[in-house]
Image: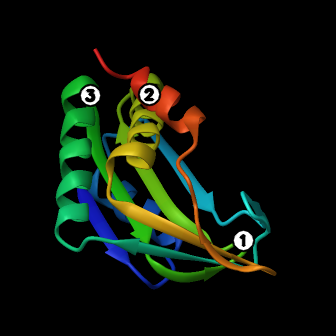
Amino acid sequence: MRVIVQEKDFDLREETEKIRQNHPEIGALVSFVGLVRDHGQGGKVLEMRLEHYPGMTEKALEALLSEANRRWEIVDVTVIHRVGRLPASAQIVLVLVASQHRKDAFRAAEFVMDRLKTEVPFWKKEKTAEGWHWVEAKASDEIAASEWIG
């Protein structure tokens, strides 16, 4: 289980190979890469700034991955989340889930992303032609995360 919060970009192929080399027993590897959209709540996005609470953010991610591991048969999982200033179309987040079977990998990856969006302390600002503004939480994210409770 790896949790990384960093400014620098990540390489999907490199991260995938790390898991594959360490776990030849896996039968499924699901990846999700989140990107900075060029259109946000305030119009055309020029760039985004992501902030976090160091230490607390990593602990929240680790707890989330531990819960995913309790719910599904996961062999390994990696989450890399970027912070700092990111241009439109930049990679923001990587979730890789390895398991022996695809259903566990898919469900765990979806669970991690749904809950990450609402429970992990990250804050986003978007820069548009009008300037910087905070990104408000979406009701759809709250609904998706609540479907996993219980």
Say if 5 sits above or below 76 in the image: below
Query: Viewer-proximal residue, 81 or 120?
Result: 120
| Residue occupying image coordinates x 72% and y 63% | 37
Residue identified by numbered label 1:
89
Q: Which mark is residue 58?
A: none
Q: Nearer the viewer, mark 1 or mark 3?
A: 1
Q: Amino acid at mark 3?
A: Glu
The answer to the question of whether label 1 and label 2 lie on touching residues, with beta carbons closer than 8 A, is no
| Residue occupying image coordinates x 56% and y 71% | 125
Residue identified by numbered label 2:
107
Q: Amino acid at mark 1?
A: Ser
Residue 44 position, x and y percent, is 82, 69
Query: Viewer-proximal residue, 91 or 74?
Result: 91
148 left or right of 64?
right
Dot 3: element: loop
99 left or right of 103?
left
Count neighbours of disc 2 (C-alpha within 10 A) and say few if under 14, some if 14 to 19, many if 20 or more. some
Dot 2: element: helix
Tell me the quarter of the image containing the C terminus. top left
Task: Calculate the distance from the C-alpha at mark 3 to the C-alpha at mark 2.
Answer: 10 Å
Q: Nearer the viewer, mark 1 or mark 2?
A: 1
Residue identified by numbered label 3:
73
